[in-house]
Amino acid sequence: MSENRILVADDDPTTRLLMEAALTKAGFEVGLAEDGEQALQVFRDGRFDMVLLDVDMPGMDGHAVCAALRRRCGDALPIVMVTGMGDTASVEAAFEAGATDFLAKPISWPLLGHRVRYVMRATRAAAALRRANARNAAMLDAFPDTLLRIDDSNRIIELRAAPTGVRSCCMPSVGETLHEGYPLAVATLLAQALAQARHSGQPHTVDFALDCESGHPCHQEARVSAIDGGEVLCLLRDITERKEYEARIHRLAYFDSLTGLANRRGFLERLEREIRRAQQNGWRFAVLFLDLDRFKSINDTLGHAVGDALLQQAAERLHAITRPGDMVSHDVDGLGTAEFARLGGDEFTVLLPAITRPEDALPIAERICSSMSAPFTIDGQTLGITTSIGIAVFPEDGKDAATLIKHADTAMYDAKANGRNGCRYYNPALTAEAVHRVELEAGLRRALANDEFMLMYQPQFEIGGDRITTVEALVRWQPPGAALVPPLEFIPFAEECGLIDAIGAWVLRRACRDAATWMQRGLDLRVAVNLSPMQFRASGLLDTVRDALAASALPAHRLELEITERALMADDAATHATLAALRTLGISIALDDFGTGYSSLSYLKRLPLGKVKIDRSFVSGLPDDADNLAIVRAILALARTLGFSITAEGVETAAQATLLGSLEADSLQGFLFSQPVSMQEIERLARRS
Ligand code: C2E
Ligand code: CA
Ligand code: CA
């Protein structure tokens, strides 16, 4: 419906006539009134969309009529006052009375229609705007969310709390910037969301948690939408309930409600993550599959309630065994992060992340077995149960989660078939190897505690004088009631499992003590002790050496340390510092196994070495092997140029001894002269020579 009815009130008949003509011509319907009272009367009777009021009328003037109409119709009715030219006072009075606009006389009749139409449109637009504002305000009032208006410097310039919005303790204040109103992490997150919304013009949603006064975290969702000129609207919603609900669903989906351990799905996902991590880092890890032996019969005879309680206690024991604080020895490194799951029934799995060697899993598995075999007390009854465990190792026994679990399961059946209450690797050779290593390590610890090591000495004879100058200490292990174990069968293993330092320290102390004894008995012998590369790099080496010398009162020049080229490979500050410190103590250093080719000569030249020992492998082919002969010749020439004294080891034949003598080695060591022998035997040999 078009709005085109206009009421014209003017006491001047000419003006009325002209106005009516002009407006009618412009397409309006016109109602006329001669004075104020009549204007109100006519307005009441007809429906008008606009009123043109002359200011000066007899009786009720235009201002009074305007005020009356405003009172009646509110803002929606456009009222235009017609004033005399330059009558600014009456223009002001007109606006005070509520006029929409004014027309000054003389009136331009041809333009009157346009002017009127413009005023109508403007009034309509203003009305529409007022309505829109009211609508928005109503909408915002009805909104469940807390609303922030934020300016281009991320300062909060308006805050509209909602009864259902976020709690007031978790809300910033007007005037604060995001960084003043929120903890740093949240402020940063919100600032990023704001920047994205401003940049893209698209709404952006983030969620975060705040520590609320209630002591519980308050989860909030912020929806951010750019207004313009950098201003942003941010709607905050409390989503704590939803988050708690999600967490509950997650617990239900990924955890076993009986024991609180991860369930199959949770374990599978954890395993997938571990596989990715292990692949990226070239790590190993192990999956243990546990099955309680004869659980079914307990469940069947004593009932499910007892069975459930047993499973719960079993889960608690698993936790207890592998709590970080409970670690018994270093062989369970990384165990603190072991993770458990109950796949269902009486089947449990354990993930042992980042093990170095497959056999690292065995001690843990055995510990689980022995812990499970202690009696359980349920409702006053004592139940005995044992566990069988299968072990699969990534990547050897499977490269995906399903295969690893399947193979650990297979290994578990193998353990059951082998008499239960035991552990088995999926790879049978690994079981044997791991058992051997576990026994070896325990044996070595026992050997250290019970003093089962002993030293043999092999003499080095000076060429020409045939005098014994130095004897090399060689360690052996004498387990009670078993054969002597040669060093190559346990030294490399001791290096791997970290026992070499303790064994090496024992060797040093014993060798120094024996050498001091020889000295007291008037023998002029120097003792040579082998150092493993790991000992050489260990931080406690100097202390160990000093202690051994002090405890035996052996002068430092009677101790020689044999260090392999392998140990000196790293041409770094630490290597040089250690060598220099040893030299300062007065100890001489021999380069063992020389010629095996780890280091360049220019490098060796810079080291404070007194002696090199030509490796047995070069001597063994002599004198017939032309290649070895050439090498030995070269090594000898070289060592001589560098000013080293030379010992050849592994001399087994007289021909070798003659040849090495002619090549000007300084001393010889080998079975031709003597096997490694006891310290008493050394004393006899030394007195004879
Ligand atoms: P190595 O330092 O090269 O020691 C020499 C080895 O050669 C000794 O073996 C010795 O018995 C053997 N040998 C000596 N003369 C002959 C010979 O004429 N013919 C042959 N075929 N062999 C000969 P052993 O005692 O079995 O020691 C083996 C290795 O174990 C040593 O090699 C050394 O690397 C290591 N080792 C021994 N004792 C210790 C120790 O106290 N600490 C450390 N870290 N390593 C040790
Ligand atoms: Ca040696
Ligand atoms: Ca050697």
Image (cartoon, rainbow, N blue to C red):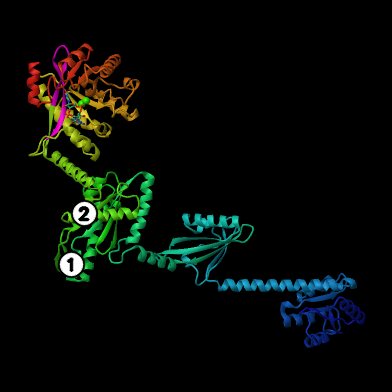
x then y, percent, for residue 489: 18, 35
Write down the quadrant of residue 649 in the picture: top left
x then y, percent, for residue 127: 71, 74
Is residue 374 found left or right of 641 in the rendered image? Answer: left
Residue highlighted by disc 2: 414
Identified by mark 1, the residue type is Ile
- Between label 2 and label 1, give the one nearer the viewer: 2
Write down the quadrant of residue 26 in the picture: bottom right
Nearer to me, 132 or 280: 280
The circle drawn on residue 298 is 1
- Mark 1: few, some, or many residues within 10 Å (few <14, many ≥20)? some
Point out the stretch of residues depicted in magenta: 457-477
Q: Quadrant of the N terminus?
A: bottom right
Decide: is 243 above or below 135. Answer: above
Image mark count: 2
| Quadrant containing ligand 1 | top left
Q: Quadrant of the C terminus?
A: top left
